[in-house]
Image (cartoon, rainbow, N blue to C red):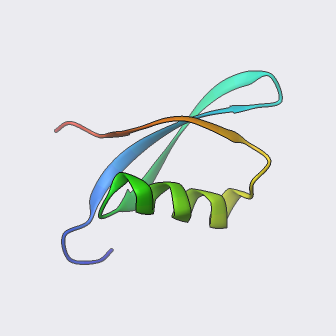
């Protein structure tokens, strides 16, 4: 985990069902990039929100 990183909740649609995954990143855009690198481009990202404490 890097300095200034937060936990983001990424909501995706894969295989016709909605799923939620947690990603550590600094910004929502970086969370999308990290998610695509880790899980591939097959899943459609619906939303990216910061996890509230």
The quadrant of the rendering that contains the N terminus is bottom left
Residue depicted at x 36% and y 47%: 8
- Seen in the image, is 38 located left or right of residue 29? right
- The image position of residue 20, as x and y in percent, is 54, 34
The quadrant of the rendering that contains the C terminus is top left
- Seen in the image, is 2 located left or right of residue 32? left
- The image position of residue 26, as x and y in percent, is 29, 64
- The image position of residue 9, as x and y in percent, is 41, 40
Could you say which is closer to the camera, residue 45 or residue 2? 45
Residue depicted at x 74% and y 58%: 40
Instruction: Please say if 33 is above or below 47.
Output: below
Instruction: Please say if 5 is above or below 2.
Output: above
Indicate the quadrant where residue 15 lies: top right
Indicate the quadrant where residue 36 lies: bottom right
User: In the current view of this chain or complex, which residue is farthest to the bottom?
Assistant: 2
User: In the current view of this chain or complex, which residue is farthest to the front?
Assistant: 29
Q: Tally the marks.
A: 0
Residue depicted at x 32% and y 58%: 27
Instruction: Please say if 49 is above or below 32.
Output: above
- Seen in the image, is 36 located left or right of residue 14? left
- The image position of residue 32, as x and y in percent, is 51, 54
Instruction: Please say if 22 is above or below 33.
Output: above
User: In the current view of this chain or complex, which residue is farthest to the top?
Assistant: 17
């Amino acid at each position: 985990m890097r300095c200034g990183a937060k936990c983001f909740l990424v909501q995706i649609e894969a295989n016709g069902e909605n799923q939620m995954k947690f990603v550590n990143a600094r910004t929502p855009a970086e969370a999308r990039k990290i998610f695509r690198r880790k899980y591939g481009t097959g899943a459609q990202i619906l939303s990216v929100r910061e996890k509230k404490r």
